[in-house]
Amino acid sequence: MSLISKRVVFGALAFSFFMYSYFVYTTGTAIDKGENLMNEASKKGKLVFQKYNCIACHQIYGLGGYMGPDITNVISENGKGAIYAKAFLTSGTKRMPNLHLSEDEINELLAYLTYIDKTGISPVKRFKINYDGTVSEN
Amino acid sequence: MMALLVKIERKEIGIVFILLALLSLIGGVFFGSLSALQFIIPGFMNDFPFFKSRPLHVSLVVSWIFLSAIGGIYYYLPRYCKLPLFSNKLPRFHFWIFLFTGIVILGCYIIGKFGGRKYWEFPPILAVPIVISWILFGFNYFKTVARKVGEWPVYLWMWGTGILFFLFTFCESYLWIFPYFRDNIVRDITVQWKAYGALVGSWNMLVYGTVIFLMERIKGDESIARSRLSFLMYFLGLTNLLFGWAHHIYVVPTNPFIRNFAYFISMTELIILGRIIWNWKSSLTAAKKDFYLIPYKFIVASDFWILANLILALTISVPAINIFTHGTHITVAHAMGSTIGINTMILLASSVFLIADISKHEYSLTEKKIITGGFWVLNIFLTIFFLALLFAGAEKGMLIVEDKLNFQEIMQHISPYLTLFTLAGLGIFVGILLIAIPSIKTINKYLLQ
Ligand code: HEM
């Protein structure tokens, strides 16, 4: 491979990467089904979520640590909900430590979880597998 | 202690990085074992919970990967590539910034001060010195290799690519500090995994560059790093680094194009798989010849783990399979299978090669025996570790999708596998100690002479 062709291939890949990044930052991620639930409280809740490193034990959309359950839809799951979640946040359990959160922090976390719940489903349990190996939601 | 460090720092900087890397590895695996024990014994070490031990584990082992790869590059450029470093001061600054920031980060984790996100859970301000130290490294690297007359071997391309894209993706992984990115969770997670996918790809560029360099040395065959095929493979790897990341987030409701595109790109890795299988027989015959060399042993093991991990990665990149495996321990098998089996094996090969090279204190016969023992312990337990995680994940995946049991019941179901995983992890810890301790001793002899 000549030096010129190496440079051309590298340049083309880098250029496409930056174009693609722009697409991902904008159109590619524009749809947010929970948009109207992203209020002041949930905005703060997002930062509280990071401050206490909840993701070390929990997953959102299946991503995170595996010590605890996926909590994407804890607000709308059968038999669960905000009051149920609040109990965990207030006193912890044998496996989940009591993080001594303030009342405000708990409410902000709940607002954030309520927002997340509306944005999608995880884990996906109802789906259809297509011939090309892709999946459609049912 | 300070005086000792200052004395050490005057020595060859590459080896100082390797020393810190090995210490980081031992610490990292220690916290990994602690995290795993917390999985199987609820309430174990309540004062030092999982949300502290896990980031300590992950950050320390990731530091091991970076420090040992960087140490190798600083060492190999002047000694083997006829490229004296542009500056001998900058690497020292790099080292000190990294060390001090590292200590502050560990302190933050221990007292429970977070604020960042996965991989970099520390308060975001600490990213600033890391970026600065990386710019020093990159500046020095490019100034150094610019002097090279004639064509660059592929590993110089790979190291340069790794350095550039690490800088970009590391900064990209901090875009969440702007509300535009963090206030929409779809965008937040997508950009996070876009950055991390490419970030892991960047450190792989550093690591794969290192193994090609080592093969060239061990075989004494310069064509390995200059052939057309090696460049084609490099560009294919780069394409995957840049565009393959969305297989981590198939379940996130992004624009479908993002998902389908990643699926397509990921499948191009079948070409790499094909090439490995095609070469398997000839590389096996060659392997027998040089297997007595310790670095070569680690390289052969990494070849085996590349095959196993590539098959797994390709499988779970098919959306129809990913839907069962995502969010289970199969993901952990993939993460640790490749960071231990591939990255750590290669970087141990490089570290052992470098240590024997620099010191007149070659490893003694007993030390060689201990390291070889460690090599086997590490690989045997890694196999068990990997399989236990795969089984735990497969079982959990089926149970979730069938939707019959709740979280506690599922965890109870897979607890035998997690116990096996933890025991095997302790075996890995022992294997790593058997390799790292004689190496640290040898480095010490050299540094203190
Ligand atoms: C060189 C050795 C090792 C490397 C490079 C390594 C690397 C990693 C990485 C990158 C992760 C993050 C996975 C993710 O976020 O998806 C991780 C998680 C983890 N590792 Fe290791 N690891 C090593 C050894 C060990 C050992 C010996 C143990 C002990 C059993 C261990 C236990 C764990 C645990 C419990 C987690 C968290 C999994 C979870 O969240 O459920 N690791 N490791």
Image: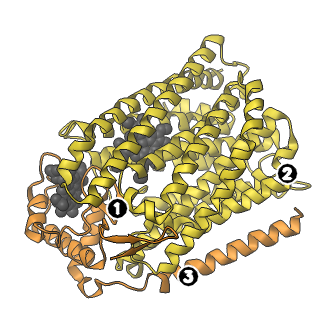
Q: In the displayed structure, would residue B41 be above or below residue B334?
A: above
Place of residue A4 in the rendered image (x, y in percent of width and height, measured from the top left): 87, 69
- Residue at (60%, 31%) from the top-left corner? B7
Q: Is residue B215 visible?
A: yes
Front in this rendered view, residue A23 or B384: B384
Q: Secondary structure at mark 1?
A: loop
**Left or right of B348 in this view: B274:** right
Chain bearing tag 2 is B
| Mark 1 CB within 8 Å of ligand 1 | no
- Asked whether the residues under the numbered discs 1 and 2 touch, taking CB atoms below 8 Å apart as contact, a structural biologist would say no
Place of residue B55 in the rendered image (x, y in percent of width and height, measured from the top left): 37, 49
Type of the residue with mark 3:
Tyr
- Asked whether the residues under the numbered discs 3 and 1 touch, taking CB atoms below 8 Å apart as contact, a structural biologist would say no
Q: Residues within 10 Å of mark 2 (few under 14, many from 20)?
A: some
- Determine which residue is flagged by label 3: A22
| Distance (Cα) linking label 3 and label 1 | 25 Å
Type of the residue with mark 1:
Gly
- Determine which residue is flagged by label 1: A62
- Determine which residue is flagged by label 2: B226
Chain bearing tag 3 is A
Q: Colour of chain A?
A: orange
Chain bearing tag 1 is A
Instruction: Please identify, in this view, whether the residue under mark 1 or under mark 2 is nearer the observer.
Output: 1
- Residue at (29%, 60%) from the top-left corner? B401
Compare marks 3 and 1 and give the one earlier in the sequence.
Answer: 3
Front in this rendered view, residue B39 or B157: B39
- Residue at (82%, 34%) from the top-left corner? B219
Place of residue B271 in the rendered image (x, y in percent of width and height, measured from the top left): 69, 57
| Distance (Cα) linking label 2 and label 3 | 34 Å
| Mark 2 CB within 8 Å of ligand 1 | no
Q: Colour of chain B?
A: yellow
